[in-house]
Image (spheres, rainbow, N blue to C red):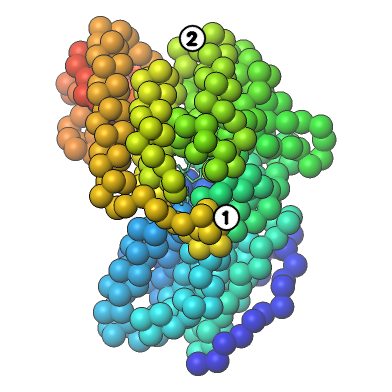
Amino acid sequence: MTTIELPVLQPEPANEHTSTNDGGHAVYVETYGCQMNLNDTEIVQAIMARHGFRLADSIAEADVVLLNTCAVRDNAERKIHERLKHLRSWRKRKPQMVVGVLGCMAERLRRSLLGEQDLVDLVVGPDEYRRLPDLVERAFAGEQGIAVKLSRVETYDDITPIRTQGISAWISIMRGCDKFCTFCVVPFTRGRERSRPLESIVREAAQLWDDGFREVTLLGQNVNSYRDPDGQGDFADLLAAVAEAVPRMRIRYTTSHPYDMSDKLIETMAAYANICPYIHLPVQSGSDRILQLMNRHYTVAQYLERIEKIRSTIPRCALSTDIIVGFCTETDEDHRKTLELMETVRYDGAYMFKYSPRENTKAWKMGDDVPEEVKAQRLEEVIQLQQQISWEINQTEIGKTFEVLVEGPSKRDPAQWQGRTDTNKVVIFPHLGTDQSYIVGDYVQVRIERATSATLFGTVVAG
Ligand code: SAH
Ligand code: SF4
Ligand code: F3S
């Protein structure tokens, strides 16, 4: 096989249908990583469908298998290497099958992925998906392909993602990240920050409502830096415009950077009933010294002042966070401060991680001096504490009645429904006997009867 680098193609106009694959090869995309990757997969599916590919539901049916990957921590990448190993057995059965690695790991590891496990034909980074159909066609002809240029302008604004399930949709409002937290690979895998036009986001939300969606989540690595390229609007203006355009749609967003969490944004959230009172506000550490080493641009006191502003403006607001334990030079004292901060804020939920050094980041050069057992111990402690706090908060919900958006059957027990409160808590409740008077996408009033640290359980008091 030869390796080729294709010239950069110009973005296609929205209405152009250039079918390069009338034979209808089937493509299967498997997604790892964050919600932005899930939305990117929907974009990739749209690009492939536009070029005549069929979407397959499984590897067994597929002529093309694409893994849309994450590089944020080492274990995310290890999972993909394992998956590729597994795919090798498929290749024996289907020698013509094309295998591609997309997403952040493709961007990070580039050429070194080509040929991994004698398997990978294509390596395509997050800003190069328009070239996929062409690269796949060439791969069928025996050429390996790599496309990993990052763009300052690509937002796939003209491509309507193919959304296949549920009543909840993601809308990427921006791509990339300019924050350069010292531990993080995202600015390298996703490139510079760029925003989509406000008007086009509002139009997409309105269309989603007409298509039956009942919840949208506006996505970006740091949504607070959103700037309308066609006007003056910031993220608060965008949120208000979407809230007004689809007044009965539930509106969520993620992720916010504490440094840019403005009063205006908090006040806008409070002003619209359909903007969900839930904020994911990653803190990472409770130690000022570590926050500075992480290049997070805020102190614990400034972070707490933001929390105070949120709570005084939106009293019902639920909060979640991300925490990294074992960042380089983190002492027992730094760790204790993180636990202390968690007790002060009392988050409804948290995503907690052991620090994983990533090559080429600033922190990579700082070393990785906290021993693995210490990291594991600290992780255990933050998880235990968070579970306790989540459990305690959830017990206080017992006896209250919430409006719940019905999402579908419970995963654990399909005889029950699963839905969410506007504060993003999962609620499980039984079907109303044989009465199917409400369905997925409806709002029901559920009275909470019991709770674990992760889930509320109740019964419907009104449909
Ligand atoms: N843009 C988002 C999230 C990016 S990645 C934000 O800023 O919040 C999601 C989370 O992964 C981060 O918040 C951080 O807690 C964690 N993370 C990122 N890089 C990491 C690393 N090298 N090791 C461990 N956790 C990491
Ligand atoms: Fe990574 Fe920081 Fe950007 Fe989030 S804000 S994606 S943690 S660099
Ligand atoms: Fe992972 Fe890339 Fe998202 S590194 S977390 S898939 S932006």
Tag of residue 315: 2
| Element assignment for label 2 | loop
- Kindly tell me whether residue 260 is visible in this rendering: yes
Residue type (three-letter) at the residue carrying disc 2:
Pro
Task: Answer with the quarter of the image where residue 387 lies.
Answer: top left
Looking at the rendered image, the quarter that the C terminus falls into is top left
| Crowdedness near tag 2: few (<14), some (14–19) or many (≥20) residues, C-alpha within 10 Å | few
Identify the residue at image location x=59%, y=30%: 298
Task: Answer with the quarter of the image where residue 61 lies.
Answer: bottom left
| Crowdedness near tag 1: few (<14), some (14–19) or many (≥20) residues, C-alpha within 10 Å | some
Q: Is residue 404 left or right of residue 9?
A: left
373 lies above or below 290: below
Identify the residue at image location x=40%, y=49%: 355
Some atom of ligand 1 lies within 8 Å of the CB belonging to the residue at label 2: no
Cβ–Cβ under 8 Å for marks 1 and 2: no
Task: Answer with the quarter of the image where residue 129 lies.
Answer: bottom right
Query: Residue 269: x, y in percent?
Result: 59, 19
